Image (cartoon, rainbow, N blue to C red):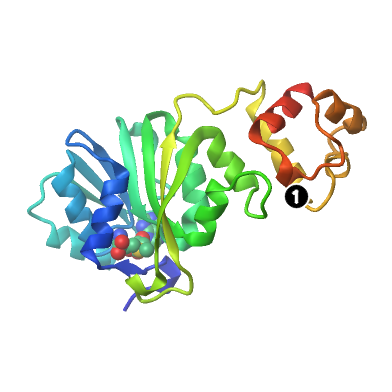
Amino acid sequence: MAKRYLGQNFLYDPSILRRIIQVAQLNREDVVVEIGPGSGRLTMMLAEEVRKVIAIELDKRLFEESKAELADYENVEFIHGDALKYPYESLPEFKVVANIPYYITTPIIFRLLKVRKNLRSMTLTVQKEVAERIVAVPGGRDYGVLSLMVQYYAEPGLKFIISRRAFRPMPGVDSAVLHIKILRSPSVSVKDEEFFFKIVKTAFSQRRKMLSNSLKSLREDIKDRLIQAGIDPNRRPETLGIEEFARLSDIL
Ligand code: SAM
């Protein structure tokens, strides 16, 4: 029985698994971390392509079953544990390929972005709506904190959609495969990263409001500062590009 609380929706179709691996652009020298190998189908295909696979599974039964199933694969290391707590900092250069359990999607992406020093890319199967938010550009309702956080550190691309019907058990939503290439340096330069993200979060905490109102708590003279940054104070946060947020953050 699949444990829904662990986000256990399994993919069986080998052609979909192959497409995921193609998106990941792997080579023989790669070390790949797979989060949630489940019964190990994708793990096995990854092991054929790369130098090493580190597969982290929280479910004890699945961990034991897949470990036994793939016992002949010497380049696969199975770890029983929580992928949110794994010490990624200790790894050499690595890539992540995973069909992510829905309930940890944003925490795991933020965790990996935080420990990105040796991380080259993430190929993630996530809920379609989350993928759309990650790749969103200014102007639409999908654009927000998640888009800016990821696009600051990385270059995300939505590669293909997987119908909910491809999963067992079938979830309530469709999925999408994202390729997130980690940038060597952030996409915009800011004087104070923490403050930059504070502005982004404050602005989007009241996304229907004009910036002159939503950012008032940060500075009394926010209207003048917005004008100084060349940004109309009547604009709403979802219309601002990442460069504009960066400029505003440096001026403030
Ligand atoms: N890779 C398999 C596939 O594509 O069919 C399974 C994917 S399933 C969506 C997610 C897997 O992540 C499950 O095997 C689940 O037990 C495991 N999992 C859930 N929470 C986890 C966590 N915090 N750390 C590691 N694995 C987790």
Relative to the observer, which residue lies in front, 79 or 188?
Answer: 188
Q: Where residue 227 sits: x, y (%)?
A: 86, 28
Q: Residue at x 71, y 39 (%)?
A: 240
Residue linked to disc 1: 205
Q: Quadrant of the N terminus?
A: bottom left
Left or right: residue 103 versus residue 68 is right
Asked if residue 104 shows in the view, the reply is: yes
Q: Is residue 131 left or right of residue 188?
A: left
Residue 40 showing in the rendered view: no
Q: Residue furthest left?
A: 72
From this view, report whether residue 59 is shown above or below residue 148: below
x and y percentages locating residue 62 in the rendered image: 26, 65
Residue 32: give x, y in percent of width and height.
27, 42
Nearest the viewer among 9 and 173 is 173
Ligand 1 - quadrant of the structure image: bottom left
Q: How many marks?
A: 1
What residue is shown at x 70% (from left), y 39% (from top)? Answer: 200
Q: Residues within 10 Å of mark 1 (few under 14, many from 20)?
A: some
Q: Report the amino acid beneath label 1.
A: Ser
Q: Is residue 98 above or below residue 168?
A: above
Residue sitting at 37 percent across and 74 percent down?
165
Q: Is residue 95 above or below residue 163?
A: above
**What is the quadrant of residue 164 in the picture?**
bottom left
Q: Quadrant of residue 41?
A: bottom left
Mark 1 residue element: helix
In this picture, residue 135 sits left or right of residue 182: right
Quick one: 104 or 212, which is closer to the camera? 212
Residue at the extreme front: 139
Rendering coords of residue 29 (x, y %)? 19, 33
Decide if ligand 1 comes within 8 Å of the CB at mark 1.
no
Locate the C terminus and report the quarter of the image it occupies.
top right
